[in-house]
């Protein structure tokens, strides 16, 4: 288990989950993560990670940089951190698309299967209820019939509001990146029938990270809105 603050991410005990993790991380990478990282989203120094893992700094840095390059962890300045699978780890891993092709294919297939089973929702570290709507692991013990309707109002945000949100990015950096969902779907044998264009965007520090990693294309706010 990896903890993110007050919440704990429990990966569902399922054979497909095992396939996913075994292909995203080779054995020494998994060992490093378990031994050195105690929380998702907690940046740690090379010194702290060396002490926790017992690996010499020089060897450890080489391993961490390789994992960072392949999208298996993130780097903030000189600090490293592990991301939860959803949202975070999945997007970075498949956006960069730099790991062994066969391993990525198997990981993508496992991700797709988890999605069809509803188990991918259980992988999320988000506290938002949208990620907890499917009782994927244990069946519900009882159902309560309410028999009441609810009105749902859908709203398309005006262009001006979207501009206002995006303009708040700090620093004011914007990038477009390959779509992780389309990449994963294509690897799993289900390519998008509409397009393979870069529809995903990043702003602020995340945009800077994508540019530093060589996967993002920098654009202006006006180009992004266009």
Image (spheres, rainbow, N blue to C red):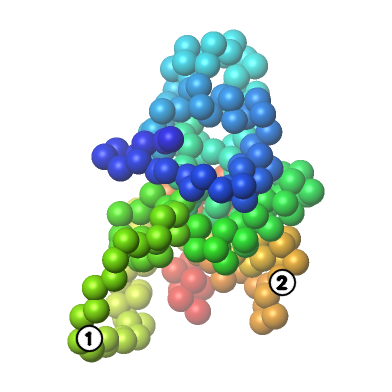
Q: Is 5 on the left-hand or right-hand side of 31?
A: left
Position of residue 104 relative to residue 219, above or below, is above
Q: Which of marks 1 and 2 is in front?
A: 1
Q: Which residue sits at x=65%, y=25%?
A: 28
Residue at (36, 36) in percent of width and height: 3
Q: Which of 195 and 27 is in front in this view?
A: 27
| Res 91 quadrant in image | bottom right
Q: Residue at x 29, y 66 (%)?
A: 142
Dot 1 or dot 2: first in sequence order is 1
The reply to whether residue 32 is in sight is: yes
Identify the residue at horizontal 32%, vertical 82% (top origin): 157
Residue identifier under label 2 = 191
Secondary-structure class at tag 2? loop
Q: In which quarter of the image is the N terminus?
A: top left
Q: Is residue 168 left or right of residue 101?
A: left
Q: Residues within 10 Å of mark 1 (few under 14, many from 20)?
A: few
Q: Between 165 and 34, which is closer to the camera in this rendering?
A: 34
Left/right placement of residue 76 relative to residue 90 reads left
Q: Nearer the viewer, residue 190 or 198?
A: 190
Which label belongs to residue 147? 1
183 to 93, vertically: above or below: below
Q: How far apart are marks 1 and 2 (CA)?
A: 40 Å
Residue 95, image x and y in percent?
61, 55
């Amino acid at each position: 288990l990896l903890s993110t603050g007050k919440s704990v991410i429990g990966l569902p005990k399922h054979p497909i989950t095992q396939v996913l993790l075994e292909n995203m991380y080779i054995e020494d990478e998994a060992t490093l993560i378990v031994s050195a990282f105690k929380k998702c989203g907690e940046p740690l120094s090379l010194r702290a990670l060396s002490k926790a893992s017992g690996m010499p700094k020089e060897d450890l840095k080489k391993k961490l940089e390789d994992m960072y390059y392949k999208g298996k962890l993130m780097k903030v300045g000189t600090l490293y951190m592990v991301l939860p699978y959803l949202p975070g780890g999945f997007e970075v891993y498949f956006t960069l698309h730099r790991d062994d092709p066969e391993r990525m294919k198997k990981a993508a297939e496992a991700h797709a299967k988890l999605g069809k089973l509803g188990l991918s929702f259980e992988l999320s570290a988000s506290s938002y209820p949208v990620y907890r709507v499917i009782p994927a692991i244990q069946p519900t013990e009882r159902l309560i019939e309410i028999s009441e309707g609810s009105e749902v109002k859908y709203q398309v945000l005006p262009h001006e509001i979207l501009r206002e949100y995006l303009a708040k990015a700090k620093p004011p950096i914007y990038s477009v990146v390959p779509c992780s969902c389309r990449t994963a779907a294509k690897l799993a044998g289900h390519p998008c029938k509409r397009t393979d264009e870069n529809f995903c965007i990043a702003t602020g520090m995340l945009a800077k990270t994508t540019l530093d990693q060589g996967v993002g294309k920098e654009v202006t706010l006006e180009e992004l809105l266009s």
